[in-house]
Amino acid sequence: MFLFTYLNSLSKTPQKLKKRMLATWTPDQELNKVRLRSGADMKRKLTWYDLVALGVGGMLGVGVFVTTGPVARKTSGPSVFISYIVAALSALLSSLCYTEFSVDVPVAGGAFSYLRVTFGEFVGYFAGANILMEYVLSNAAVSRSFTEYLSCAFGRNDPNSWRIHVHGLMQGYNMLDFPAVALIIVLTICLCHSTKESSMLNLIMTAFHVVFFGFIIIAGFCNGKVDNLVKPGGIAPYGVRGILDGAAIVYFSYIGYDTVSTMAEEIKNPSKTLPLGIVGSVLIVSALYCLMALSLCLLLPYNMIPEGASFSAIFELMGWKWASNVVGAGASLGIVASLLVAMLGQARYLCVIGRARLVPSWFAKVHPTTGTPLNATIVLGICQASIALFTELDIVIEMISIGTLLVFYLVSNALIFRRYVILSKNPPLHTLLFLFLLSSTSFAFSLSWKFKLHWWNLMLFAGLIFFTTVIFQYFVPMVVMERQESWLVPFMPWPATISIFLNVFLMTTLKMVAYKRFGIWTCVITIFYVLYGVHSTYHAEEILEMVVVVDNVNVNSSTQQQITKVDVQLV
């Protein structure tokens, strides 16, 4: 019976896709009707300093301790700190777009919700699935780095000393990491208990972590040599191309600020707290990243920097055994904090996707006592523990970057569309044409750069991007009435335009293997949407429409009865 019903539903897939793929929700529906599907509400306990600490804790540790060493050695050289500046600019512009959306639509869905209210269900689902992939893979990668640094803290020089080598498994999957699995299990249990207590734990760990950062920065600047920045090969031995290629990889470091936006349902006074939390954390982390990367390259020539557990290993090479142990302990603490924040955010994403019925509604349930999405937290913890047990960092890191860049690109597009079409009531054609031309010219510029075409190609496409934006700004009016509970990105459309360009540019610098893996993931999530998601959401909306009709009938019937009673009294 079930199989017959499903096959019958599957036969109607084209009609359902036509109705649901571009279906949008209003912010009011997201805030009220959809949120009610979780049963209990999440508890509003977080303040602005909780958000800043969550943002800083979520980003610190991931980038510096995982990507800086390999990028400095193989991609950018001593100019890795410039790569961080380029990535920071892109992250800051994207964070501004996130901030406006998060204030206007303060729900736990982050990019999923923002894109669903702007471009429709499928684009929102596509972004949400990629964000979840990014979270699970990055958390698995970072938890394996925790094992490396913790072993350094206990004086072990070999990063694999606490891992178990299994003969017969494929290279890259044959080093089993049980400490990483244990860490994920412990953090999953903490997150199931309470958001506020988890936030306080993160605040304490982040404070200690910043102290460790200060130690490394001071040690680097006091004991390093400027000669190490220019020898061998100069400050940029791989050229400008190496700097930008490095920026695409270290962008992985800025995963975390979007987690702050997923806390929107648990924040006191979101319109004031969210801008401080998102933008403030990006600015603080950007400064620390650049100083850390610079201090690393001051301590040792780039071609001698170890790739694994770089900061601990570099002090070991200098003969500072005690400092290596201290840095290992500090890095481990920072990685725990960043994991805690990332795992906090990923569960909120899956919870809201479950509310939309794009995955089973079981994931949307919020525990009435703890106020946390318990089911989503446990399942995602199991998934990333399984990946962390087997998979090496190199295999997942570039796939993480492409997913992140793509979602941030979509959010920047959505902000322009929302400002100029939805809020300003302009016809959509002009804005869609502008977004198409902007993406096309950005892609053409990026390919010209990648394949080292003549300089005039770069000048041509850069000029087209500039003049297209000027013409759009001049001829398409933007009329947005500021509300008391709003926060608007200034100088639109320029911040979003630059963000789109940088995200496209950084995506094209990634290797082909990242696109192949991303293509496989895209096929998987699209098939899931066609076979399950669209049918589930279609059925959920049918039920909602029936409820609305019944409510209207009841209201009309009640009103008619009251009118009849009045007529009788008048007679």
Image (cartoon, rainbow, N blue to C red):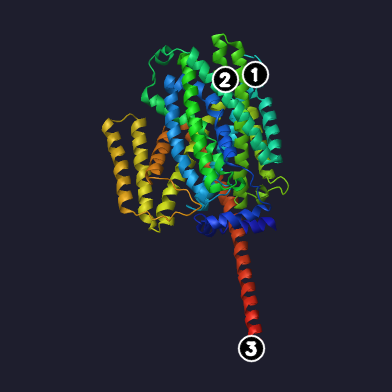
The residue at which mark 1 appears reads as 151
Task: Determine the image quadrant of residue 262.
Answer: top right
Estimate how packed mark 1 is, as few (under 14), some (14 to 19) or many (20 or more) residues with alpha carbons within 10 Å: many
Outermost residue, top side: 319
- Residue 357 in percent (x, y) is at 61, 52
Of labels 3 and 1, the one closer to you:
3
Question: What residue is rendered at 48% in x and 47% in y?
Answer: 100
Q: Nearer the viewer, residue 433 or 260?
A: 260
The residue at which mark 2 appears reads as 309
The residue at which mark 3 appears reads as 570
Tell whether label 3 touches label 2 (CB within 8 Å). no
- Labels 3 and 1: the sequence-earlier one: 1
- Residue 499 in percent (x, y) is at 41, 40
Estimate how packed mark 2 is, as few (under 14), some (14 to 19) or many (20 or more) residues with alpha carbons within 10 Å: many
Q: Nearer the viewer, residue 391 or 496?
A: 496
> Relative to residue 440, is residue 73 drawn left or right?
right
Tell whether label 2 touches label 1 (CB within 8 Å). yes
Outermost residue, right side: 369
Instruction: Answer whether residue 274 is visible to the viewer in this image.
Output: yes
Q: CA distance from mark 1 to mark 2?
A: 10 Å
Instruction: Answer whether residue 123 is visible to the viewer in this image.
Output: no
211 over 477 or under it: above or below? above
331 over 482 or under it: above or below? above
